[in-house]
Image: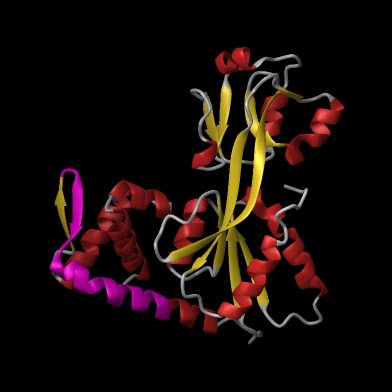
């Protein structure tokens, strides 16, 4: 049996929606349907009852859930146990690329340890992939733009920033900006209150380059644009209301290596006032 079949089964069980499961696992909806069909054929039983707007576990599906979770956990333990040439305990941290600066001080402290007692591994992934990595126990800790959207995970507010509307045009007002063209940056649900956008993009340096062309505006943290503001390449939009952006650390409710994770969490919480983000 392909282990991805079980991972897909649990994701459909969580979302109760094939399209949402496909988005979370970064595959097509047809792939999700095929995996569930093949798993049902292999087990010779229906796992989900499907109606037009509802997907529910059958009794067989309910019985499979704890077994699937246990098998995925065993698979992850086996995968970790085969890490060559290093028998130190490992902590795996996942983060969207835009939040990588918040981990910088943690990496620096790790490099100063001689030798570090715990091997830290960092993975840059999309928020949905970070969530899936935590649920499948590939990750021990993750960063996200919102409180963790799953009951198995605990959330800790890591940082809070104001986002400011900026443009490549000097003297642009809020009223004009609303009709000029907004790039909605995926800073999370709390920051998604802009007027109708022209583009929706993940946070990244490419947004600044688009703004410097002078044809759009977007909400960004000041730490990202201080150099461009000083150089006159970007400008704050006059009278535009700021937006709030919050970053959370996600970890399991009952984590393995709890003491080590609490130490890492304390290090991350100490970065709340870090000026690099």
- x then y, percent, for residue 25: 41, 55
Position of residue 151 in the picture relative to residue 202 (left or right)? left
Q: Residue furthest right?
A: 231
Query: Is 58 colored magenta in this rendering?
Result: yes
Is 219 positioned to the left or the right of 27 in the image? right
Q: Establish if 111 lies above or below 81.
A: above
Is 167 located above or below residue 5 in the figure? above
Residue located 19% across and 44% down the image: 53
**Total marks in image:** 0
Which residue appears at 18% of the width and 72% of the height?
43
Residue at the image point whose x is 83% and y is 24% from the top? 232
- Quadrant placement of the N terminus: bottom left
Q: Is residue 42 visible?
A: no
Image coordinates of residue 37 in percent, x first then y, are 21, 60
Percent x, y for residue 123? 60, 61
Q: Which residues are magenta?
A: 52-74
Query: Is 156 placed left or right of 111 in the picture?
Result: left
In the rendering, at what x and y percent does residue 226 appear?
80, 35
Q: Is residue 110 left or right of residue 134?
A: right
In which quadrant of the rendered view does residue 257 lie? bottom right
Magenta stretch encompasses residue 86: no
Q: Is residue 108 visible?
A: yes
Magenta: main secondary structure:
helix
Front residue of 124/265: it is: 265
């Amino acid at each position: 049996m392909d282990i991805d079949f079980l991972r897909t089964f649990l994701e459909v069980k969580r979302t109760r929606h094939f399209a949402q499961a496909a988005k979370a696992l970064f595959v097509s909806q047809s792939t999700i349907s095929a995996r569930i069909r093949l798993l049902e054929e292999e087990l010779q039983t229906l796992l989900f009852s499907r109606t037009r707007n509802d997907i529910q576990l059958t009794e067989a599906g309910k019985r499979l859930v704890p077994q699937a979770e246990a098998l995925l956990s065993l698979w992850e333990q086996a995968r970790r146990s085969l890490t060559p040439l290093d028998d130190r305990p490992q902590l795996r941290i996942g983060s969207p690329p835009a939040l990588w600066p918040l981990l910088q001080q943690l990496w620096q402290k790790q490099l100063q340890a001689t030798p570090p007692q715990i091997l830290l591994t960092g993975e840059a992934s999309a928020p949905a992939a970070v969530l899936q990595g935590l649920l499948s126990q590939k990750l021990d800790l993750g960063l996200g733009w919102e409180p963790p959207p799953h009951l198995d995970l605990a959330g800790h507010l890591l940082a809070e920033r104001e986002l400011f509307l900026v443009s490549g045009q000097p003297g642009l007002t809020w009223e004009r900006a609303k009709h000029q063209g907004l790039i909605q940056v995926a800073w999370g649900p709390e920051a998604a209150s802009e007027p109708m956008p022209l583009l929706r993009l993940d946070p990244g340096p490419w947004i600044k380059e688009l703004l410097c062309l002078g044809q759009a505006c977007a909400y960004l943290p000041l730490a990202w644009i201080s150099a461009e503001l000083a150089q006159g390449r970007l400008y704050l939009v006059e009278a535009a209301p700021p937006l709030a952006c919050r970053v959370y650390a996600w970890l399991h409710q009952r984590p393995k290596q709890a003491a080590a994770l609490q130490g890492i969490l304390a290090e991350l919480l100490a970065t709340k006032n870090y000026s690099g983000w």
